[in-house]
Image (cartoon, rainbow, N blue to C red):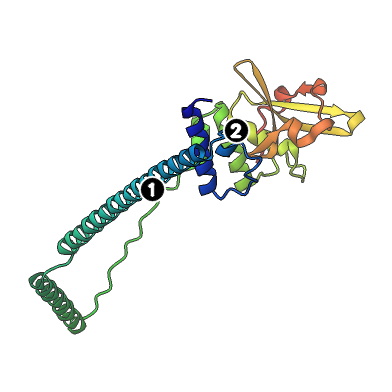
Amino acid sequence: MQSNELYQIAYRCAEQNNAGCAQDCVQCQYNIYNYVSDVREASLLKATATTDFHRIFTADCIREAEDNASNRRTWIMCIVIIAFVILCLMQCVRMVYTPGEESVREFRAEEQAKAAAAALAYQQAQKQPVVKPVVQQQVRSNVDERTYLRENQNKPENINRVLAYMNKHGVKDRNSDGKVNCIDYSVTFRELYGSQAELIINVNNATNFNHMFIQLRHNGKVIDVEPQGTPDRYAMNLVWGMRYNRAFNRNATSGWGGWVGP
């Protein structure tokens, strides 16, 4: 075995010893005496390798300590610089937002002047007689809803307006039969809405249904209106459900359309 290889074995033995080796030296692969029969030569190799290891190990430790110290100094310097910058900023903010003595005196003088003016105005108000203002009632123009509907007839957008008017003002007995029912509501709706509101009678014995209501036609669509409904609920199928069957509709406008009660 060459001397360089023997030196590497002895050096590895020094590393193991520095790390706290607890192996049996007789059977250890890094025991130089197992490879060199000359004790003097083996001892010299071991001493040389051990010396070299400790020299290199010590140099590495010193270099690492110096690097750590340099890093600590760098961090300390950064912290000192940051703290100095923060202190400078705080001082600048304090100088900007802290008023001087002259500003404080001016502010106090202005506040005192305002307080004196308010007190003087209060005293003068106490001496003067109290004059109650004359409140003029504004006459609000009350739009005649019935006139509006008569001037804007046969417009589908007025369905809600007609129903609201009828719910608000009620319906009279239009045919003088002593009752106010679907006939009176339908005739009144036609009068308010216009001549395009057709009077429809639906008699269906199967569902016990006998009723008059309104039918409108607009842009090819048929709108069945329950005149006793509300502005948000007036469609016949919604009000009457399964009891209403359009197949039993019969137009009764010719018999009732021109009738105007008392």
Q: Nearer the viewer, residue 92 or 145?
A: 92
Residue 234 on image: x %, y %: 68, 35
Residue 8 on image: x %, y %: 49, 33
* Within-10-Å neighbours for mark 2: few <14, some 14–19, many 20+: many
* Within-10-Å neighbours for mark 1: few <14, some 14–19, many 20+: few
Q: Quadrant of residue 25?
A: top right
Residue 95 on image: x %, y %: 15, 63
Q: Nearer the viewer, residue 118 or 159?
A: 118
Q: What residue do we see at 70% from left, 24% from top?
A: 253
Which is more foreground, mark 1 or mark 2?
A: 1
Q: Nearer the viewer, residue 90 or 225?
A: 90
Q: What residue do we see at 71% from left, 22% from top?
A: 254
Where, quadrant-wise, is the N terminus in this rendering? Answer: top right
Q: Nearer the viewer, residue 26 or 200?
A: 26
**Residue 55 relative to residue 154: left or right:** left
Q: Helix, strand, or loop for circle 2? A: helix
In primary-sequence order, the first of circles 1 and 2 is: 1
Question: In the rendered structure, which amino acid carries the disc numbered 1?
Answer: Thr
Question: In the rendered structure, which amino acid carries the disc numbered 2?
Answer: Ile
Which label was assigned to residue 58?
1
Q: Quadrant of residue 262?
A: top right
**Residue 151 relative to residue 185: left or right:** left
Disc 2 designates what residue? 159
